[in-house]
Amino acid sequence: MKTIGVLTSGGDSPGMNAAIRAVVRTSIYNNVRIMGIKQGYNGLINGNIEEMNLSSVADIIHRGGTILRTARCDEFTTEKGLQKALNVIRIFNIDGIIVLGGDGSFKGARKLNEAGVPIIGVPCTIDNDMGYTDYTIGFFTAVETVVDAISKIRDTSSSHGRANIVEVMGRSCGDIALYAGLAGGAESIIVPEENMEVDEVCKRLIQSRNRGKLHSIIALAEGAGNAYEYAKEIEEKTGTETRVTILGHIQRGGTPTAFDRIIASKMGHKAVELLLKGDAGKALGIKENQVIDLDIDEALSSKGFFDKEMYDIAKILSI
Ligand code: ATP
């Protein structure tokens, strides 16, 4: 393997830059040429590709976002788009590609692999919705951002004696709500994986109000229902003014936590090592603090894991 390409695709996540740095430096350490493919699969289709060197990745380990930029590329999902990408891969003499992204990006990577281009996938998404790995790169940074926001909302919520629904990202995965809800001391955590009736949320709010608590935080995963409808019903049933805060894209930015930088560095390094030893069609992940690799098909078909035990603990601790 003489030339490796690296791209970031789908939604960005803090830690992508640390992973790019690891890929670039490990490639150069092994005397392999490393090409940065810009804006996800768009760069493969348009040939927006540049050789990288040691200084291309200087001073980025602490930066959120991705220096390669990212995009969603519909054209790549078509046969014509795939053929264009394969042509560009040939022109640039790229022998293998490391794809940093989520589920969708891995599906694109699998197509390249099936077409004969060796690929390795590195899981980067704040959602933590890839069931085969304990954690995805960016997840813990997003959790920190939400916990910080909850602390601030709690201050004003106490002053006014209000309830506050904090809607967080995660699509159909409730992990950000669960982890940030537990760490932020939320009274209720509403996630798509578990059924929590509004009456139960109201009961918890009334109980805590009766023992003198001035605020109430409800962590709501975006995939678990409409925040404004919840707020209306809670306000009607409890008589407590209930506000909604939708955190949105601030969860995708910011300086990555040390943990995200570490797993990004380890997996970026491992991705290059696997390609160099002739492995292909693999996804990397973290299990019990170790980097694991498995077939990308297996990774894509793995069922989501929801930590029910943690959810139950959070419920007990917020009575
Ligand atoms: P995130 O979890 O942050 O949204 P993601 O990687 O799942 O990240 P998607 O928008 O689902 O984000 O996918 C990113 C890109 O991957 C798509 O824009 C497309 O270019 C490519 N892609 C997704 N699905 C496929 C597919 N079935 N075949 C080929 N390419 C795909």
Image (cartoon, rainbow, N blue to C red):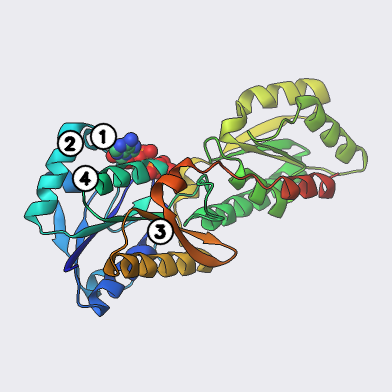
Q: Give the crowd class for mark 3: few <14, some 14-19, many >=20 residues within 10 Å.
A: many
Point out the frontmost of discs 3 and 1: 1
Q: Which residue is mark 2?
A: 81
- The kind of residue on which mark 1 rests is Thr
How far apart in space, not on screen, are marks 4 and 1 (Cα)? 13 Å
Residue 21, above or below 230: below
Secondary structure beneath disc 3? loop
Q: Position of residue 247 (x, y in %)?
A: 54, 42
- The kind of residue on which mark 2 rests is Gly
Identify which residue is drawn at 60% across, 26% down: 226
Q: Which residue is mark 3?
A: 64
Secondary structure beneath disc 4? loop
- The kind of residue on which mark 4 rests is Ala
Q: Which residue is mark 1?
A: 77
Residue 10 visible in rendering: no
Identify which residue is drawn at 35% across, 41% down: 107
Picture quarter with the N terminus: bottom left
- The kind of residue on which mark 3 rests is Gly
Q: Which residue is mark 4?
A: 115
Along the line of sight, which residue is nearer the eye, 146 or 17?
17
Point out the frontmost of discs 3 and 2: 2
